[in-house]
Amino acid sequence: MLRAVLRRSKSNTTSPLCARASSRRLSSLPSRPHPRRRSFLRQHLKLIPTAKPPPFNAHFRPLFTRSVATSSPQSSPDVYDAPEKLGFEKLSEQFIEECKSKAVLFKHKKTGAQVMSLSNDDENKVFGVVFRTPPKDSTGIPHILEHSVLCGSRKYPLKEPFVELLKGSLHTFLNAFTYPDRTCYPVASTNAKDFYNLVDVYLDAVFFPKCVEDIQTFQQEGWHHELNDPSEDITYKGVVFNEMKGVYSQPDNILGRSSQQAVFPDNTYGVDSGGDPLDIPKLTFAEFKEFHLKFYHPSNARIWFYGDDDPMERLRILSEYLDMFDVSTAPEESIVKSQKLFLKPVRIVKKYPATEGGDLKKKHMLCLNWLISDEPLDSETELALGFLDDLLLGTPASPLRKILLESSLGEAIVGGGVEDELLQAQFSVGLKGVSKEDIKKVEDLVMDTLKSLAETGFDTDAVEASMNTVEFSLRENNTGSFPRGLALMLQSIGKWIYDMDPFEPLKYQKPLMALKARIAEEGNKAVFSPLIEKYILNNPHRVTIEMQPDAEKASCDEAAEKKLLDEKKASMTEADLSKLARATRELRLRQETPDPPEVLKSVPSLSLQDIPKKPVQIPIKIGDINGVKVLHHDLFTNDVLYSEVVFDMSSLKQELVPLVPLFCQSLMEMGTKDMDFVQLNQLIGRKTGGISVYPFISSVRGKADPCSHMIVRGKAMSGRIEDLFNLINHIIQDVQFTDQKRFKQFISQGKARMEDQLQGSGHNIAAARMEAKLNVAGWIGEQMGGVSYLEFLQSLEEKVDLHWNEISSSLEEIRRTLFTKSGCLINLTADAKNLTNSEKHVGKFLDLLPSSSSAESKIWKARLPTISEAIVIPTQVNYVGKAANLYETGYEFNGSAHVISKHISNTWLWDRVRVSGGAYGGYCDFDTHSGVFSFMSYRDPNLLKTLNVYDGTSDFLRELEMDDGALTKAIIGTIGDVDSYQLPDVKGYSSLVRYLLGIEEEERQKRREEILSTSLADFKEFAERMNLVKDNGVVVAVASADDVDNANKERPNFFEIKKAL
Ligand SMILES: [Zn+2]
């Protein structure tokens, strides 16, 4: 319900344990498409699950007896024009105004499986099957199973049907999530044929996976002992094992997990469904099989369909699967029991691994957690709690967030606020980067602030801003790159999974109106104060967690693991050892043996005839208002205007570049002469759907100079367009750069964010570093968001007190240089009426801009030296990159490069870096603007070994054999990326980006033709290019000190070492 809209990207504690599930979180803030991140977002899907082949199991038996019976009548569809005849009973039917859908809840009579079927006019069709999978321990069974079921099934007996779908379908979404108590398998596509292909592969995977009969899949995806040679040490390997080691390397994640487990000591949330690396190796194959047999059963399934396809076809497909099963007792066994409230608060102190050196005293974390209730809450209370959360923590102006950050007691907020995706809601908040002696002060500050808010209530403007923000989000229904039907499914399942009404979470209008009426009548204090008192202040179920940094913990943990493995080895006979070495070899051999072509063909695919020959067109009209170019995109936006005000950044002095992110934050969070930043933010919340400011940097193909702009992005309902442009004008012209204290907070928040990035997203940091060595745009990006930026923040922190005037006037200088009429361009997306209406407001806005800047275009010539570097951080897993600029070697861009690089990622790198290497992910990316081709690995146990895989790419291409079917799949998958589904605001934005980068329609058509006509010869030719990366590429790794030392022993002086944390 509304809570999903209210939810922001706060640091989150509960929920999906698989890192790949993080994209699920929706943000009500405007998204910030950024060309440097583009490739990561796409690649994120590839960092998904996977596994292997084998034969069948007990589950299969009913299949054979019954498949004969069900398959024949299915061919005459008119017989099955009623759900009853297909074996379903209609339980309820409702029209849901909020999502304009007819929703029908069915029960499959034989098994009790439940189906929600939503029909509407959304072409982005969604299917999902969800099982209740509460674990009893932290061995990670649900998570390993989530990976493994997608590794081959009865009808699709290849190693990884999932990867085949990634390669060759038009999916708009394809992934799987493990929550603390459920596992979800969603797919989406706009093409009906493609959609049903995806549905069938997923249904076969969850009900008839090969992994339950095949220990090698379990070993690969879960864990196994690895021994290459009896003379070497035994190690642990496994995709989930390694993924979770990465998770347990991040302090915020350790805190989140510890909090959840301490709040729920008595039910399933007291263990980690993702798996604790210490417990994963305790899991046996027998337990794993048993878990699947019990919980992956139709009786325990909730199935979701959404979109504009034929609702009867959905039931027809389902009945074929569901009819093969009988009813089971799984629904009783999978019930999630609630945690009883404590009688008195609890306090916990834990250690987390930190780096040696640095100031460990200032690295404590303190988080307060409450279990809100042990009984289900009514929907109005839930809604009110959602608003309370937004009011307390939602924006930088929200009182609890603001007071905590301004206290200077810590660097950044931890805890997720109100989290209500599990059976019982929790509230958590705290700070990290705290001194040991300030721990008690943080605790008192949280409690005192909540007390005083309960006494005074909230500012009326703040409540109005929060209400407007939520109503705007609901009206806009902007789920970003997430299909709308999937967002709805996750909302509905949040209740449905606990046997509550699946319709209720979709219907927000009535409770919202009721809550608004109550606030208007009784005042916000009467509504919110009792909630703060009852659920937080007077609630004895409070868990206070203090996390202490421990410089020895990482090496102790490693030593303990090694000891265990050494003992294991000591206990083995020579025969055992050679048996293990053989098993290791056999597993690797299987991983490296491709599926035979006839097996690959079992995965259904579209043909090239199903693919449109023309690229997706976005309407664009280029006009002029007061001498400034204005791009119009006439699209239906449900009465919302999206606008981007774009300023040229090329005249900015080079030394001011690293200040740009802090400049952007200052604009939004410092306030003007007449309004402090709280008032300014409330005004933005009350009048608009949000405003953001950020730099846009990209290389331009064929040009030495990068494209660099500052973009102010905003959205508003049609009646508020004037307010929107007034506010943008206030922000860029009237904000005062005088608040030294706040600026210092920005620096420490920025530092904390960059440190998180280094540990959690080292691949982005390494990629940025490589780009900085290869082109100017990359250098700028790294100055504003890489290791250089972190170093800049560290030195700025030291001089901000002494040199504040200088810094403040630098911020003024950036404003003077950027915000002028001469460097401005406006981009507008809305329907024709609103486009016309907005013109006068745009004109007025432009009149108020200074007319020209005295600064000239600066030539930025900087690059980082092209040495191979290792950024050393405390971590259990590495991120390894290698890249080169193909344009500098004379390569001329051809659309086939998209097909080839996607294929390299999905086959060669997936097999070698992930499947047999044990990394969580490995991929390559070709930036067509800069010409940089890069390899990257993610949560990788290896270092040099991964580089060897990259270097083997040219041989892989040279020896590649591909039949027409495989080639067609690679082409279709690439078209799926190119034609990715976009909501109207993103369409308008994409068109703007093309305009800025000078990409014309003719070129898009040409690239599409090149993609569609890609041949095997193109792959072979590309092998030469990969040779150049091998010989001339630059290497950057974010890695542990030990692994870098070992690499430098093996290849003397290979890495220049840089300590970053
Ligand atoms: Zn995972």
Image (cartoon, helix red, strand yellow):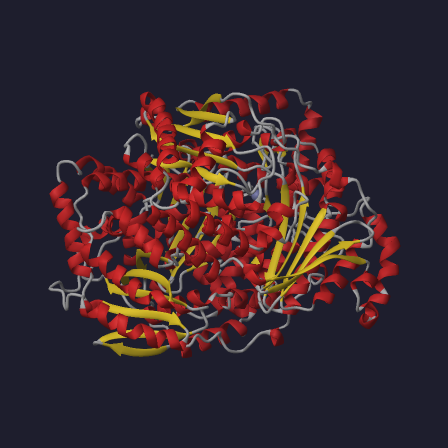
Residue 900: x and y in percent read 51, 63
Residue in the foreground of this view, choosing between 80 and 20: 80
- Residue 1055 visible in the snapshot: no
Of residue 787 and residue 937, the one placed in the foreground of this image is 787
- 842 relative to 583 in the view: left or right: left
Q: Position of residue 483 (x, y in %)?
A: 54, 59
Residue 235 locus on image (x, y percent): 57, 31
Q: Horizontal placement of 1025 versus 576: left or right?
A: left
The image position of residue 441, as x and y in percent, is 33, 24
Above or below 912: residue 720? below
Identified at 12% across, 45% down, the residue is: 806
Q: Find ligand 1 in the image and state its quadrant.
A: top right
Tell me the quarter of the image containing the C terminus: top left
Describe residue 584's horizontal placement relative to residue 468 as left or right. Answer: right
Q: Nearer the viewer, residue 626 or 977?
A: 626
Quadrant in which residue 168 is drawn: bottom right
